[in-house]
Structures are given as C-alpha cells and as structure tokens.
C-alpha cells in the first residue's frame, strides 16, 4: 500500500495579506521616510501634501511650529507592517525634525494576481504556472 503525501499548495502558501500604512510627517522629511519604508519591501507609495490644523500656540508648545505635512500612503505586507511601525517609532524619536504618526489599515482584497504580486513584492507567486 503506497502512502501519498499531500502536496502543499504553493500558490496559497505564498499569499500574504496586505495593509495600507499611513504615515504623517513633516513635509521636509517626506523623501527620507519614503526611502526608509522602501527597506521594508514596500513597492507602492504615494504622498500628498497636508496642512496641520492645531492652533499656533499649541504647535509652539509641542515644538511643531512648521504645520506643513505630508501624508504617505504605502502598501505593505502584513508580516512586515509591525517591523515598519517599530522602525518608524524609533525614527520619530531619533531623527531631528522627524516627528510623525503612523498607523495601518487592513485591506480585504486586491483585484488581479499581477497587481497583488507587485504590491506584495512576491514575484514567485504564479511563476510555476508559466
């Protein structure tokens, strides 16, 4: 009697969930944080200009006189998100003028295998089909 092993489906084992990482930083530090997040296998990022809304007295008290901000939207694999958030927290405390906030939002779906492969930095997914 032959024993057959169940072959693990590589296609499903390589699928990682994605999160939207939102980072709000001083506008002058936008490129620094975009480059930093690239080290966490983030393949897609975009930034938009933003303006702080706190009163000038409050900003002065917190040492945040410059109200010009950027919001960076990054798509990151769920397994890399926690490391990225910890790294950002460290940079917010150690980089001069690098204060900011960051949070993630889970994504429920992505349409298209090629798009998912790009966003998740997973070039192996679907390679066996070629």
Image (cartoon, rainbow, N blue to C red):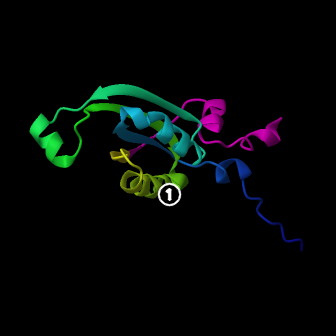
* Above or below, comparing residue 38 to residue 81 in the picture: above
Instruction: Name the residue rendered at 55%, 30% in the picture.
Output: 111
Q: Is residue 125 left or right of residue 56?
A: right
Report which quarter residue 30 is drawn in: top left
Image coordinates for residue 65, horizontal then vertical, percent: 22, 37
Image coordinates for residue 34, horizontal then vertical, percent: 50, 38
Q: Is residue 73 left or right of residue 39?
A: left
Mark 1 Cα-neighbour bin, 10 Å: few <14, some 14–19, many ≥20:
few
The magenta span reads 104-130
Q: How many circles with numbers are drawn on the protein?
A: 1
| Residue 33 inside the magenta-drawn segment | no
Image coordinates for residue 106, horizontal then vertical, percent: 42, 45
Q: Quick one: 129 or 27, which is closer to the camera?
A: 27
Q: Quick one: 118 or 23, which is closer to the camera?
A: 23
| Residue ID for mark 1 | 83
* Above or below, comparing residue 78 to residue 64 in the picture: below
Q: Residue furthest bottom?
A: 1
Instruction: Name the residue rendered at 19%, 48% in the picture.
Output: 62
Image coordinates for residue 73, horizontal then vertical, percent: 43, 34
Report which quarter residue 29 is drawn in: top left
| Residue 129 inside the magenta-drawn segment | yes
Report which quarter residue 4 is drawn in: bottom right
Q: Residue furthest right?
A: 1
Q: Quadrant of the N terminus?
A: bottom right
Q: Is residue 90 left or right of residue 67?
A: right
Q: Quick one: 104 or 13, which is closer to the camera?
A: 104
Disc 1 is placed on an element classified as helix
């Amino acid at each position: 009697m032959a024993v057959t092993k169940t072959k693990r489906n590589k296609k499903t084992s390589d699928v990682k969930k994605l999160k939207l990482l939102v980072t709000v930083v001083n506008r002058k530090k936008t490129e620094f944080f975009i480059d930093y997040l690239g080290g966490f296998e983030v393949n897609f990022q975009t930034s938009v200009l933003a303006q702080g809304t706190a009163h000038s007295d409050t900003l002065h008290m917190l040492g945040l006189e410059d109200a010009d901000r950027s919001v960076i939207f990054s798509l990151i694999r769920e397994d890399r998100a926690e490391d990225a958030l910890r790294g950002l927290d460290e940079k917010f405390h150690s980089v001069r003028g690098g204060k900011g906030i960051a949070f993630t939002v889970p994504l429920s779906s992505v349409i298209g295998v090629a798009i998912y492969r790009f966003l998740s930095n997973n070039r192996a997914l679907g390679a066996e089909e070629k």
